[in-house]
Image: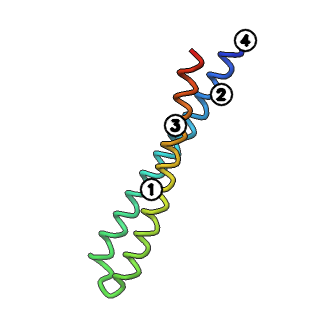
Amino acid sequence: MDNKLIDKNILDLKFKLQSQFMNTSLIMMTIGLLTFISTFIWYKERIFFGIALSTIIILISLILYFSADKKIKIILNKIYKLK
């Protein structure tokens, strides 16, 4: 196989991994928002705990999302340079 093709396949696999990280972080963000909403409905006496938990989940998912987004842009630039 050609070295360019091997490099492109490796970059494609890295791209797929980072896109899965982005999907996972979006799912975590949705879970954080649902936790935030559910604390207002079911746990009115423990509202601070729900808000803190939701904030932590959303912050972690945002960090993962933007990290994966930055890595995807780098991978795409490398793929374009291979062509």
Q: Amino acid at mark 2?
A: Ile
Instruction: Please give the name of the residue rendered at 40% of the width and 57% of the height, measured from the top-left corner.
Output: 29
Residue 60 lies, in percent from the top left, at 49, 61
As drawn, 33 above or below 72: below
Left or right of 53? Residue 71 is right
Residue 41 lies, in percent from the top left, at 27, 76
Mark toward the start of the polypeptide (2 vs 3): 2
Mark toward the start of the polypeptide (3 vs 1): 1
Q: What residue occupies the far left of the structure in this picture? A: 41
Q: Are marks 1 and 2 in contact (CB under 8 Å)?
A: no
Circle 3 Cα neighbour tier, 10 Å, few/some/many (<14 / 14–19 / ≥20): many
Instruction: Please give the name of the residue rendered at 41% of the width and 81% of the height, measured from the top-left corner.
Output: 49
Label 2 – label 3 distance at C-alpha: 13 Å
Q: Nearer the viewer, mark 1 or mark 4?
A: 1
Label 4 – label 3 distance at C-alpha: 25 Å
Residue 15 lies, in percent from the top left, at 55, 34
As drawn, 53 above or below 33: below
- Element under label 2? helix
Res. 62 mark: 1
Circle 4 Cα neighbour tier, 10 Å, few/some/many (<14 / 14–19 / ≥20): few
Circle 1 Cα neighbour tier, 10 Å, few/some/many (<14 / 14–19 / ≥20): some
Res. 75 mark: none
Q: Amino acid at mark 3?
A: Ile
Q: Amino acid at mark 1?
A: Leu
